[in-house]
Each structure stands twice: as structure tokens, then as C-alpha cells.
Image: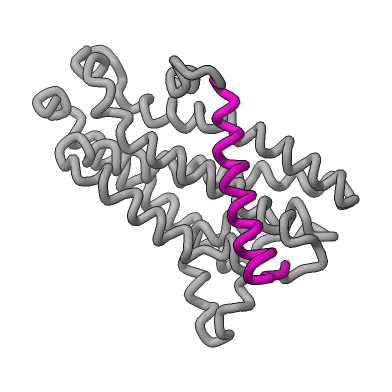
């Protein structure tokens, strides 16, 4: 799946790195140089920004690919013995490859800016697990609905764009008036983005609060059950809509 995305290109998988880096450079100059946005903690803005953008790239790219995972594989769906449930998982796994590459880029930035390393930073794997679990639930839901309602693939990029700007990735949460910051609590990606930052660039790893963790997993498990239920109910009709 990962190789097929770049079939026929001269750059091959290099494009998996070049495109996101170009986005990072553009956002950096617009916000850090143009608007002079600074990091809310004692680290360079580029480090704070990239650390929040990496999990978003994984979430965004995976979900957009997963949404079309069933409708774009009609030859497999029509094979009655093929377990279509694995198709969203395949796209999720494929998206982990550029994610690992970006984690090495982040590692290079951490070394360059002399960010101390200690064992607790491995907690980042927990937030990666959070992202993948949320993706599987949403992926089963959207990929199954996309087979019947083709508007999903057109509406989802719009939703993801709004979701991106609603998450403090390129702007610090301190810009939100204190009375409205509680709204961020209801955004599951805020939990993940801040989790990556707290484990990778803070001087000491901060464990997430029990309240926010309970809310995140409540939403994630609900989406996992809902996505699994909808997928199971609709999978028997996939072949009829292909």
C-alpha cells in the first residue's frame, strides 16, 4: 500500500518526507517569522511546532486514506473470503512508515537543541497507541459509510481542515481566553498532540490527568465500538455498491 502511493514517480518514497517538510517550512515562516508566534514553553518554536504536527500528520493522512480503503479495493471486497475489516488497518500500518521517519527528524532536532533524554520519554509510544486506536474506530466508520455515501471522501477533508485549526498545533493554547480553554478538553486530538509534546520536549515528562485520560478513552472506545458495529452491519452490502 505504501509503495503503491508513489508508483511511477521519480522521487518514490522521498515524497513522503518532502511534502510534509515543505508544509513545516511554510507554517514556520508564516507563524514564527511573520506573526512572531513563540512557544509557550522554554523551547524553540520550531521544536514545539514540529512535535505537535507529527501526530497530526499521522492522524490526518491515515484517516483520509482509510476513508477510501474499501471503495478503492472492489476486487478484494467482491472476494467473499477476504476479511474487509483489515483494509483500514493496512492503511494505518502503511502510514506508520512516514511517521517513523518524522520521529527520526524530531530526534535530530532534539539533539540539535540539546533537549535532555531520559527513559520516561518512551511514554510517547502510549500516545502513538492512542492515535492508532482512535484511527481504527473512525476508519471503520468512515470507510464503511463511504461505500454507500460517496460524499464522505469530499466532506472529510473539510472536516479535517477545521479540526486542524481547532487544535493548538501552530498556535499555543495560551491564545485562547482562559474561560474558553475548557473547550480544548473535548478535542481528542488535543490530548494526543499535547501528549507528544509533554513526553518529547518538556524538561520533565508530565503524565496526563485522570479526567482527560478518562474522557479520551471514553470517546475512543465509543468510536471503536460504533465503527465496528456500523462496519459489520454494512459489509454484507459492499459488493452491491461497487
- The colour scheme of the drawn protein is one colour
In the displayed image of the protein, which residue is found farthest to the left? 240
Q: Is the stretch drawn in magenta largely helix, strand or loop?
A: helix
Q: Residue at x 33, y 27 (%)?
A: 85
Question: In this image, 3 relative to 241: left or right?
Answer: right
Which quadrant is the N terminus positioned in?
A: top left
* Residue 189 vertical placement versus 72 (above, below): below
Magenta stretch: give its range.
12-39
Indicate whether residue 186 is drawn in magenta. no
Can you give x and y, in whole percent of width and height, for residue 9 in the image?
A: 48, 19
* Residue 47 vertical placement versus 235 (above, below): below
Can you give x and y, in whole percent of width and height, for residue 167 in the image?
A: 51, 63
33 or 94, nearer to the observer? 33
Question: In this image, 29 relative to 57: left or right?
Answer: right
Q: Residue at x 72, y 47 (%)?
A: 123
Question: In this image, 182 relative to 4: left or right?
Answer: right
Indicate whether residue 23 is drawn in magenta. yes
Number of dots carrying numbers: 0
Occupied quadrant, residue 13: top right
Q: Residue at x 59, y 43 (%)?
A: 22
Q: Residue at x 51, y 70 (%)?
A: 184
Occupied quadrant, residue 236: top left
Which quadrant is the C terminus positioned in?
A: top left
14 or 62, nearer to the observer? 14
Amino acid at each position: 500500500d505504501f509503495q503503491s502511493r508513489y508508483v511511477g514517480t521519480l522521487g518514490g518514497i522521498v515524497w513522503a518526507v518532502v511534502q510534509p517538510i515543505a508544509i513545516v517550512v511554510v507554517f514556520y515562516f508564516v507563524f514564527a517569522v511573520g506573526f512572531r508566534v513563540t512557544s509557550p514553553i522554554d523551547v524553540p518554536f520550531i521544536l514545539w511546532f514540529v512535535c505537535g504536527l507529527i501526530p497530526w500528520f499521522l492522524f490526518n493522512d491515515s484517516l483520509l486514506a482509510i476513508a477510501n480503503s474499501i471503495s478503492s479495493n472492489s476486487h478484494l471486497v467482491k472476494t467473499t473470503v477476504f476479511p474487509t475489516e483489515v483494509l483500514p488497518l493496512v492503511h494505518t500500518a502503511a502510514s506508520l512508515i512516514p511517521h517513523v521517519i518524522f520521529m527520526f527528524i524530531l530526534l535530530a532536532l532534539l539533539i540539535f537543541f540539546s533537549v535532555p533524554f531520559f527513559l520516561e520519554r518512551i511514554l510517547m509510544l502510549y500516545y502513538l497507541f492512542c492515535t492508532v486506536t482512535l484511527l481504527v474506530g473512525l476508519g471503520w466508520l468512515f470507510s464503511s459509510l463511504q461505500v454507500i455515501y460517496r460524499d464522505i471522501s469530499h466532506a472529510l477533508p473539510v472536516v479535517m481542515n477545521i479540526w486542524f485549526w481547532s487544535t493548538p498545533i501552530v498556535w499555543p493554547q495560551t491564545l485562547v481566553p482562559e474561560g474558553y480553554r475548557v473547550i480544548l478538553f473535548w478535542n481528542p486530538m488535543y490530548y494526543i498532540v499535547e501528549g507528544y509534546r509533554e513526553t518529547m520536549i518538556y524538561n520533565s515528562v508530565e503524565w496526563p490527568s485522570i479526567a482527560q485520560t478518562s474522557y479520551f478513552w471514553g470517546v475512543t472506545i465509543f468510536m471503536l465500538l460504533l465503527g465496528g458495529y456500523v462496519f459489520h452491519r454494512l459489509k454484507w452490502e459492499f459488493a452491491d455498491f461497487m
